[in-house]
Image: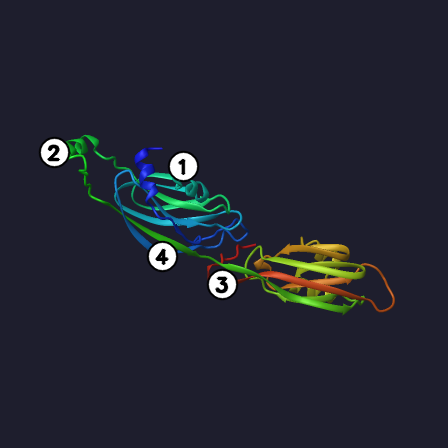
Amino acid sequence: MDPANTSSMRNLSIFAALLFCALAANSYAQNQIVWTAANSETIPLEPASLHAGRVYSPAVGGGDMHVQIDSRYPVTVAMAWADEWNVAMRPGAPGNFSFLCVKEHVTSAIYECHLPSDRPMIITFRDERRPEKPVLTAIGAILGPGARQFFSPNDLHIQYYRCLQPEFHWRRILNEKYQITAAPKVYSLMTPDHDGQELSVRIKSPIPLTVALLPSHLADQVYDKTVTLTEALDQTGCKERGVQSMSFNCTFNVAHGTQTLLILPDIDFSGHKKATVEANTVECVEHCELLSAPQNP
């Protein structure tokens, strides 16, 4: 590493901040993301100096960041691992660390980087100008050894952004112990708010059951016996047979409308028997207007 850069780094303070936009990989990544301006700072950089900006702490699985850079003179922008950077700041440390998402010769640009893991990273800025050593030598010869060469500062403006995106929480929508009968048990659950919405079902029963998630109109037809159970089950991928003690997950399709959980016994039985059913789903709770519109089936 350039000694001039190393000495410049020693005098820099490091600002810690939470990641403004944690975008861990998940099934909701296709939804709209809106970046909004957060805080900003302006830094006067000297030639060859290296400045540390914000520390980004992504969620597990990584995340994305988005920053507007405006600089009077070209700078190199890059992400460094925060732990490596902190070690490099110690007196006598060699200053060896790796960079990701390196972008050179920046004067005005949107800088973006996908952070690959939940390991914190720090955004760095290096002034690409080099001190004019021959000029400095000449000044020293005239004014003495304590003379210092002065440069026009490189005013670096950093506009940080945070993102708005749909937020999701698990919510219990069903928890019941019911008397098993030969007729189907139907629970009209909900109309999903996004494609791929998760549903977790837990069943405990003394006898084997068939459990299926169906569009409500189809479940009604099974209940009314205008459609056979076999025909209905052929139209859903969310079904289990022979269930007595089991947890399983399904996903919703918005285009199918209101969804119904249908349960019925697989065998003939006598006496009073009860089954327990619990269902939980992931629902949008914040910024739901940014959800992607459902695709046509």
Q: Gap in Å between the C-alphas at discs 2 and 3?
A: 66 Å
The residue labelled by disc 3 is 286
Determine which of the numbered discs, if any, sits on residue 124 in the image.
none
Up the image or down, 76 lies above or below 246; here it is: above
Is residue 12 visible in the rendered image? The answer is: yes
- Circle 4 residues within 10 Å: few <14, some 14–19, many ≥20: some
Instruction: Look at 36% across and 43% down and name the residue there.
Output: 124
Instruction: Look at 74% across and 68% down and name the residue there.
Output: 177
Is residue 76 visible in the rendered image? The answer is: no
Q: Gap in Å between the C-alphas at discs 3 and 4?
A: 19 Å
Precedes in sequence: disc 1 or disc 2: 1
The residue labelled by disc 1 is 93
Instruction: Indicate the quadrant where residue 273 lies.
Output: bottom right
56 relative position to 180: left or right: left
147 relative position to 84: left or right: left
Instruction: Indicate the quadrant where residue 127 lies.
Output: top left
The number of discs equals: 4
Q: Looking at the picture, which amino acid does disc 2 mark?
A: Ile
The residue labelled by disc 2 is 142
The residue labelled by disc 4 is 37
Q: Gap in Å between the C-alphas at discs 1 and 2?
A: 35 Å
Q: Looking at the picture, which amino acid does disc 3 mark?
A: Glu
Q: Residue furthest left?
A: 142
- Circle 3 residues within 10 Å: few <14, some 14–19, many ≥20: few
